[in-house]
């Protein structure tokens, strides 16, 4: 079990670094490029053409939210949900299943990364930083950590997972 524990820990760190790198890459995109990528994804999800998506965005009022905006926010949430999963797994195994410390450190890592990512995005051309996005990202990581903590403790024996084997 020690080999499995070590393998899960290594894979968790690799996945965490990959997710952080992807988030960094998305934040580095200039506004026009980021919008273009989002519209392509929205087009695939909705089956509408990019021209139709542009038309709908131009017609919307300030109090309306577009499908493109919802998809962008879902992307934020999903990336950070995965970041929370792998941050918690990696730290839980690194800290010998000290659950409170693993949860606290995972939350801190995700919150600091979300804030620094928004600051990084601010310096990318045509982009802004948003406290709402930091909160959305942090909510995603919170849920990822909670789900992983719950599954790990319910199905893998919690604190005893891989400890003495």
Image (tube, helix red, strand yellow):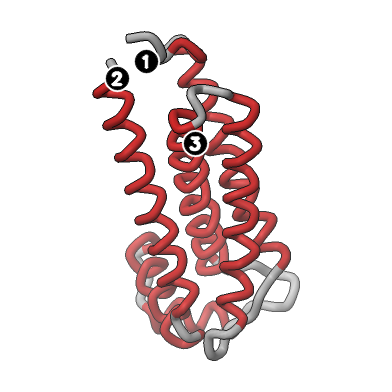
5 over 71 or under it: above or below: above
In terms of depth relative to the viewer, which is nearer, 159 or 151? 159
147 over 29 or under it: above or below: above
Which residue is located at x 58 percent, y 83 percent? 127
**Cα–Cα gap, marks 3 and 2:** 16 Å
Which residue is located at x 47 percent, y 21 percent? 151
Mark 3 neighbour class, 10 Å CA radius: few under 14, some 14 to 19, many 20 or more: many
61 over 159 or under it: above or below: below
**Cα–Cα gap, marks 1 and 2:** 6 Å
The dot on residue 4 is: none
Q: Earlier in the sequence, mark 3 or mark 1?
A: 3
State the residue position of label 3. 91
Mark 1 neighbour class, 10 Å CA radius: few under 14, some 14 to 19, many 20 or more: some
Which residue is located at x 61 percent, y 81 percent? 122
Q: Splitting the image into 4 quarters, where does residue 10 fall? A: top left
In terms of depth relative to the viewer, which is nearer, 96 or 99? 96
Describe the element under mark 1 as helix, strand or loop: loop
The dot on residue 2 is: 2
Q: Position of residue 19 (x, y in %)?
A: 40, 55
| Quadrant (top left, top right, bottom left, bottom right) of the C terminus | top left
State the residue position of label 1. 162
């Amino acid at each position: 079990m020690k080999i499995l524990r070590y393998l899960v820990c290594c894979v968790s760190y690799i996945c965490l670094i990959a997710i952080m790198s992807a988030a960094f890459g998305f934040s580095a995109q200039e506004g026009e490029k980021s919008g273009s990528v989002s519209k392509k994804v929205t087009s695939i999800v909705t089956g509408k053409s990019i021209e139709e998506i542009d038309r709908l965005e131009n017609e919307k009022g300030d109090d309306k939210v577009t499908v493109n905006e919802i998809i962008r926010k879902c992307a934020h949430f999903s990336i950070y949900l995965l970041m929370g999963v792998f941050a918690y797994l990696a730290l839980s195994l690194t800290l010998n299943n000290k659950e409170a410390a693993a949860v606290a450190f995972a939350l801190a890592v995700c919150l600091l990364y979300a804030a620094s990512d928004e600051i990084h995005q601010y310096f990318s051309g045509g982009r802004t930083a948003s406290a709402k996005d930091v909160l959305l990202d942090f909510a995603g990581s919170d849920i990822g950590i909670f789900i992983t903590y719950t599954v790990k403790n319910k199905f893998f024996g919690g604190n005893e997972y891989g400890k003495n084997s």
